[in-house]
Image (cartoon, rainbow, N blue to C red):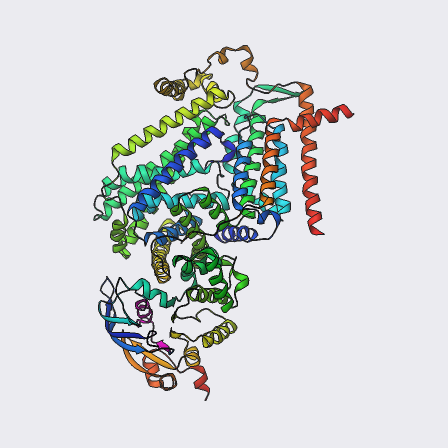
Amino acid sequence: MSHHIIDFKNVFFHYPDGTEALRDISFRITHGESVGIIGANGSGKSTLLLHMNGCLMPSSGTVNIGDLYLTKKTRQEIRRSVGVIFQNPDDQLFMPTVYDDVAFCPRNLGLDEDAVRQRVHDALSLVNGLELQDKPPHHLSGGQKSSVAIASVMAVEPDILAMDEPAANLDPKSRRLLINMLKTFHHSKIIASHDLDLILDVCRRCIVIKDGTVVADGPSTEILSNRALLEENNLELPLSLQRS
Amino acid sequence: MHMADALLSPAVGTTMWAGSVAALGYSSRKLKENIDNQMIPLMGVMGAFIFAAQMINFTIPGTGSSGHLGGGMILAVILGPYAAFLVMASVLTVQALFFADGGLLALGCNIWNMGVYPCFVAYPLIYKPIAGDGTSARRMSIAAIISVLVALQLGPFSVVLETLLSGKSELPFSTFILFMQPIHLAIGLVEGVVTAGVIRYVKNARPEILQSSGAFRPLDTGISVRKVLAFFVIIALITGGALSWFASTHPDGLEWSIEKITGREELAVQERGIAPVLNKIQEKTAFLPDYTFRPAVTGDPEAGNGPAWPSIEAGTSVAGIVGSAMVLGLVLLTGIGVRSFKRR
Amino acid sequence: MTFDEEYYNIGYLDRLSYQDTFVHNLDPRVKLITTMLFLFAVVSFPKYEIVALFPFFLFPVLLLTIGEIPLLFILKKVALVSPFAVFIGIFNPLLDPVQVTVLPGLTLSAGWFSFCSILLKFLLTVSTALLLIATTSFPGVCHALRQIGVPSLFVSQLLFLYRYLFVLAEESMRIIRARDMRSYGRRGTGVKVFVRIVGMLFLRTIERAERVYYAMLSRGFQGDMPALRNFRITAADLAFTASVMGCLYLFRFYPVSEKLGLFAQGLF
């Protein structure tokens, strides 16, 4: 199955104010892979994720998602296959109730209300959040918010999941639940995070970004045990590797 | 200053609702014509911003009392008048619901007083001409201060009119005005300075926001003065029509207050104020030809002893007191009954 | 009221609105319309009316008790917003000195009656409006507005405002705490600092709006907010509407208190 491929070729991006956020990024992620993207604050991780579904368009270079070449025309279709989960669930959950939020995607696809209800039901049960559906997001705990944020993206059954700091602000138990949940997903996964233990746990492969370029790309176990490389990027060895 | 339900008569409340609903419909239609999709979340989050900012208080220099922000003008400058009006209306609606600021009937008045004036009067007629193309920070500050001042004079003035036309308060027009306007001059000055400060802060920190938001504004040509005036004339006619209809069918509301006003010597000025205007509108439009202000009432011998007052006989008033007590008792009993039933 | 109190107050009211009682489960449209009719009926009484207003307390009392809303909380909120109405009304007894004999030997100026009437109306209208939101979730109110025909742009505006109200209020609360912690009393709470705080909050808001917009785009937003769930009117809704309207009509046009009083007088 070739259609779950993500292919960045020589991607550059600068913001309107002139800041160069991405400089010559190239990588290829194949079907079913789970990839961690790590790097210091401001290294360009979030900007990179915003390119995966065309929220931002590369200033130069190409992005291919599956068979589709990312353009203004194709991005609506790409958004169906790539679900992006943002760092702050308060930005992600913008509808007034959990139900309406999870239903936002399916309704935008023009499904009828019965099908929407089914989608919402499925997505919420995937994250064990069925009982939350009538609550407004501001009544949820941090862990519940991030579960619902995942459900809201899963409701369109995307092929690829891209997440920005999924475990930020979670207490250890919610974080553990999230990790276990992520492991059960068979999608291609791209996770940008400072939580290197999470990356080590969930992702086989790891890409290190510095000042908008790829400085390392390889198996997580290798990269995450390379103390010199990590420290150069304001990171440190994952706790689980520090002990041994 | 929020208008309150209890001070309002249904006629005034409905009229102001009609005006505000018309402005809402007009704004959403105008906005929809060429909306940038990014405006939708921006407006929503801006509303929450104004709401939160209004909850922050600050010390007014020299007085020690605390003030807070109205925000209509900041919105108009950033979002343009149509979007700003919708945001302001939504903020006032949420306040009416969650804080009971004003109330639901008075919401129409409040949207009008605090939304229409800054967005559709002060912004196009005062801010835009003074601020010009937005390159001079000083002109923008001056424009912000003056336009906030004007908007905050028009708002309370409407509160005064709405209260008096509703006829529930005995405050004479002149006293009321003398009380409301100067206070709001002070409030307006502070708010104007704050508005100018915030706009300047944003201009220094992220100048592109003020510029790019200019692109959002479907109103770069500015609202034409003539259109605004025509709109106000129409609203005034509708108001006059509704009020005169009400006055003619409902003798104890408006008329009573007008009679009160005209019946007082120190308010003789007022005779040249509201009543003749209404009369003139009435003559011009002839909504209800049989309308009269019944000046006879003032000459009526009974008028002095409490006109329009429901019959005051000792017998019925005793019945009224006893009955009221019983009704209250019954209501309370019902309440207690439901509570204890629920506890079980 | 301090910022914290104000914030927790809305939060509490909001939480109340998600309870599960008979009143909470009524169709939001029904509650909105009956509340508006109620307000109209109350406000439409002439300025001196007092006696006929009492029966109307039945409506808020029933909402309060069936909806399991704490009485004290509502009363406190009513008291908080009362100054303006009280201030305007308090002049009536002075300015309207026409003497009225209430009972043999007891004479009051007519202004007292209109003042009391304002107070009663104030209590009735404000408590009922608060009870509407305490028994109906805000999204519910918005659904009702949408179905009644309010422009969708305005309704989605309300929904966004509601959604981010709590987020931004919390953010400002953190800023305010930081300000108050470091301003030791008065200095630091002035206009200059306020302008900077509001400016900062404003910039953060703009940035948040950008992020929200990206999140919306990522999930297929193309300019139209999708329609919200439809509510169905149930038998309970119809029964509620009918009985409220019946009572309102009765209380408005039939002097219930007075007749009851006359009846009681006849007994003794």
Magenta segment boundaries in residue numbering: A34-51
Confirm whether the magenta stretch covers residue A153.
no
Answer above or below: position of B268 versus B66.
Answer: above
At which x and y percent is residue C264?
Answer: 74, 27
At which x and y percent is residue A209?
Answer: 30, 76
At which x and y percent is residue B44?
Answer: 39, 51
Q: Image quarter for residue A200?
A: bottom left
What quarter of the picture does the C terminus of chain C occupy?
A: top right
Residue farthest along the right direction in this orientation: C268
Query: Can residue B76 be seen at all in this image of the molecule?
Result: no
Q: Image quarter for residue A12?
A: bottom left
Residue farthest along the bottom direction in this orientation: A244
Determine the residue positioned at 47% across, 70% down.
Answer: A170
Confirm whether the magenta stretch covers residue A35.
yes
Determine the residue positioned at 62% across, 18% down.
Answer: B311
Answer above or below: position of B182 versus B336.
Answer: above
User: Relative to A42, is B296 on the left or the right?
Assistant: right
Number of labels in the image equals: 0
At which x and y percent is residue A70?
Answer: 27, 67
